[in-house]
Image (cartoon, rainbow, N blue to C red):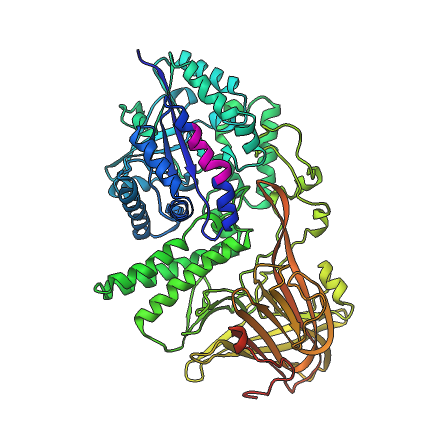
């Protein structure tokens, strides 16, 4: 007798760089107990996808999990699915890397479980129409994808009764429509509600099918779900009810459904699940989308017309967040460099494999976007990506055996304007002349570390919900994560700030006279100059290994506009881990003026309140010296940030005394656990009180980086170099 089939798939993943304790907690609370219950329910057969990151961790930390998976495979209860090994967004990386990542996971699963996967888990279900060719060429025959994608293409829900076939250039791929209603019901609805929904579908579509495929973290990692699924017995009850209704209902792996004849052709538009498209929108559009959705629901029109309301596009994150774009373009640069080296040196395959593995790890999707689950706001995830990309880049440089220092101009971030890229054995740097002459990326190649990886505070569309957030979860244990509005601590609203410039380095302020530390920390400070985001002219001197950036700008004062010329010359040396900056400031046309000139640098050593990471002022460790502390010091010579955990630090020294301010950068973001405060780095200001005239005032600042024992002990009054 034919039965209604529920094709059931689970996707498990942890990001590159996530804390070991998080891996362990997720394994203990979700991955392991889920399979243990599945083992008891022999009537259930499902598909499982895990990222290679998680497989590798479990192989080392929990070999018994491998044994359990193998046993379930042998019993026919589990079908494995492939994907990119390090869970990349396939449309965001070069196709050669997509193919390589899929092959890497295929080989891993073949080696450890003797399975050749035919289905692929599409990371974040981010689809573009060119994918069938790429996937078919990689041996993929089917993938589950949201019914949302089909609705955007004009399908009706009642048409999604089986697999569909699509193609690109004749390369075929089977698509299985995941039901959003089931994603929200399992496990957040009651078991009875789930069974009733399936029963209703079976009555409408006898001998038909439904597809459920979603994150395995819903079964034990998301808030309250471990207690709900295991302690309160939701998952066991679900499995028992499935068996009790086995006269008409059968749980099967996705691949079994994919083998059925398709019910039609489908050509889907670029899309992801609805929430992702919403998150990709800029703040104003984000709110308008929510208001429009709410209005349609109030008009009882959402069910009919909601499919015509869609948000943005995943690639919108590259425009929404400069930090995502910079990371993405770093990844592309490393990938292109590796591909070029491989083309010219095919005999060095084993060495290339090492660099390629680090590149692939740097393509893990999590910090390349931000939503309730996205990792951009998590500094340890961002820094892990940069660590892998910098390591890959460094290994390629070693293979090239080219130790020359190079300074070149290229549109690095693809905004239509050239950046200046400095590459040496010790460090790599990217300067942005078109936007304030800022230093926007600094890779310490020997330490696989970017200390400038901070996050700019910006308005998010969900911030208005902070007024409704509560610090204690409601008693209901089954509320969907999409509905909860929690705050992890009180007072988060007071931390909301909106920066109007990218929080990186060599940001040039001219403060009004009323600006003090308190006004600066509040974000309500007066700015007289036009040097922070405006363009600088630049010149590269290869012989002297210098970059000179110049702007003829202005001070805007109540009694008139005063012309000011600012020049910053950055000098590098091959093999060294420091940058020498010479500022030259003058007032042409006979003007004389007093100014409060501030040089802002932002650094992130990840742990804001750890004992092994701290600030020194003039070489002294003060009582409150945590990276997330605040401080204001008058007429001192320099500051240092030391990270004893990684044995790396930065010392910023000037040839004249200045006031030094430092304060933490805290963002307020929404995660699956609610609103939370996250340390994103520390802002430092060197404040110089200067008298400007036609005769240039020169300030020399050195930025030393490297292992702690290589940093200068003295941070006061450095010798004048190249006056």
**Position above or below: 409 against 143:** below
Q: Image point 55% across, 32% down: which residue?
A: 225
Q: Position of residue 430 (x, y in %)?
A: 47, 68
Q: Is residue 683 visible?
A: yes
Front residue of this view, candidates 591 and 431: 431
Q: Is residue 151 visible?
A: no
Q: Position of residue 95 (x, y in %)?
A: 31, 50
**Position above or below: 537 against 628:** below
Q: Image point 45% across, 32% down: which residue?
A: 34
Q: Image point 56% across, 26% down: which residue?
A: 232
Front residue of this view, candidates 53 and 258: 53
Q: Residue furthest right?
A: 514
Q: Quadrant for residue 500, please give it.
A: bottom right
Q: Residue furthest front?
A: 64
Magenta residues, start to end: 28-37
Q: Quadrant for residue 575, please give it.
A: bottom left
**Does the segment drawn in magenta span residue 427?**
no
Magenta region, mostly helix, strand or loop?
helix
Q: Position of residue 192 (x, y in %)?
A: 52, 17
Quadrant in which the C terminus is drawn: bottom right
């Amino acid at each position: 007798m034919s039965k209604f089939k529920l094709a059931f798939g689970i996707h498990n993943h942890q990001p590159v760089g996530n804390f070991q304790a998080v891996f362990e907690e997720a394994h203990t609370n979700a991955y392991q107990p889920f399979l243990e219950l599945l083992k008891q329910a022999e009537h259930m057969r499902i598909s499982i996808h895990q990222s290679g990151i998680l497989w590798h961790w479990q192989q080392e930390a929990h070999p018994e999990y491998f044994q359990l998976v193998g046993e379930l495979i042998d019993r026919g209860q589990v079908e494995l699915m492939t994907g990119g090994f390090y869970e990349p967004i396939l449309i965001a990386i070069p196709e050669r890397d997509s193919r390589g990542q899929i092959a890497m996971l295929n080989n891993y699963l073949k080696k450890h479980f003797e399975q050749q996967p035919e289905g692929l888990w599409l990371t974040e279900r981010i689809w573009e129409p060119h994918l069938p060719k790429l996937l078919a060429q990689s041996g993929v025959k089917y993938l589950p994808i949201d019914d949302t994608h089909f609705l955007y293409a004009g399908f009706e829900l009642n048409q999604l009764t089986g697999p569909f076939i699509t193609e690109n250039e004749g390369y075929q791929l089977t698509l299985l429509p995941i039901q959003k209603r089931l994603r929200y019901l399992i496990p957040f609805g009651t078991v009875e509600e789930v069974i009733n929904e399936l029963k209703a579908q079976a009555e409408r579509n006898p001998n038909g099918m439904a597809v459920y495929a979603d994150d395995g973290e819903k079964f034990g990692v998301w808030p309250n779900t471990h207690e709900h699924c295991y302690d309160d017995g939701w998952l066991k009850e679900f499995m028992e009810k499935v068996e009790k209704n086995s006269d008409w209902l059968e749980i099967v792996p996705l691949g079994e459904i994919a083998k059925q004849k398709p019910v039609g052709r489908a050509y889907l538009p670029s899309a992801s699940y609805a929430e992702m498209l919403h998150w990709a929108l800029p703040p104003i559009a984000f709110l308008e989308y929510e208001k429009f959705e709410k209005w349609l629901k109030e008009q009882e029109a959402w069910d009919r017309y909601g499919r015509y309301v869609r948000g943005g596009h995943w690639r919108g994150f590259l425009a929404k967040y400069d930090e995502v774009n910079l990371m993405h373009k770093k990844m592309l640069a490393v990938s292109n460099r590796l591909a070029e080296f491989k083309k010219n040196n095919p005999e060095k395959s084993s060495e290339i494999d090492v660099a390629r593995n680090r590149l692939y790890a740097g393509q893990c999707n999590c910090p390349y976007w931000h939503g309730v689950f996205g990792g951009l706001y998590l500094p340890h995830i961002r820094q892990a990506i940069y660590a892998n990309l910098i390591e890959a880049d460094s290994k390629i440089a070693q293979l090239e055996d080219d130790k020359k220092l190079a300074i070149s101009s290229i549109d690095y971030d693809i905004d239509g304007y050239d950046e200046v890229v400095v590459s040496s054995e010790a460090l790599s740097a990217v300067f942005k002349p078109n936007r304030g002459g800022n230093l926007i990326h600094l890779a310490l190649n020997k330490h696989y570390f970017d200390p400038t990886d901070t996050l700019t505070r910006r308005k998010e569309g969900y911030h208005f919900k902070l007024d409704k957030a509560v610090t204690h979860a409601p008693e209901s244990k089954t509320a969907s994560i999409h509905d909860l509005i929690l705050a992890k601590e009180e007072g988060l609203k007071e931390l909301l700030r909106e920066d109007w410039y990218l929080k990186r380095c060599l940001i040039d302020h001219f403060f009004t006279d009323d600006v003090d530390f308190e006004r600066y920390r509040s974000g309500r400070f007066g700015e007289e100059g036009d040097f922070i985001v405006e363009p600088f002219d630049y010149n590269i001197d290869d012989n002297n290994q210098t970059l000179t950036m110049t702007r003829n700008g202005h001070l805007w004062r109540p009694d008139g506009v005063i012309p000011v010329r600012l020049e910053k010359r950055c000098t590098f040396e091959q093999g060294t881990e420091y940058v020498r900056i010479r500022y030259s400031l003058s007032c042409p046309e006979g003007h004389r003026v007093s100014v409060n000139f501030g040089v802002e640098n932002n650094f992130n050593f990840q742990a804001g309140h750890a004992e092994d990471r701290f600030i020194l002022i003039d070489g002294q460790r003060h009582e409150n010296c945590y990276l997330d502390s605040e401080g204001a010091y008058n007429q001192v010579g320099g500051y240092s940030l030391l990270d004893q955990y990684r044995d790396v630090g930065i010392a910023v020294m000037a040839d004249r005394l200045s006031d030094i301010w430092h304060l933490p950068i805290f963002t307020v973001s929404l995660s699956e656990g609610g609103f939370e405060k996250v340390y994103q780095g520390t802002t430092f200001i060197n404040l110089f009180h200067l008298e400007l005239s036609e005769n240039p005032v020169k300030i020399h600042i050195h930025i030393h980086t490297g292992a702690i024992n290589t940093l200068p002990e003295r941070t006061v009054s450095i010798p004048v170099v190249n006056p």
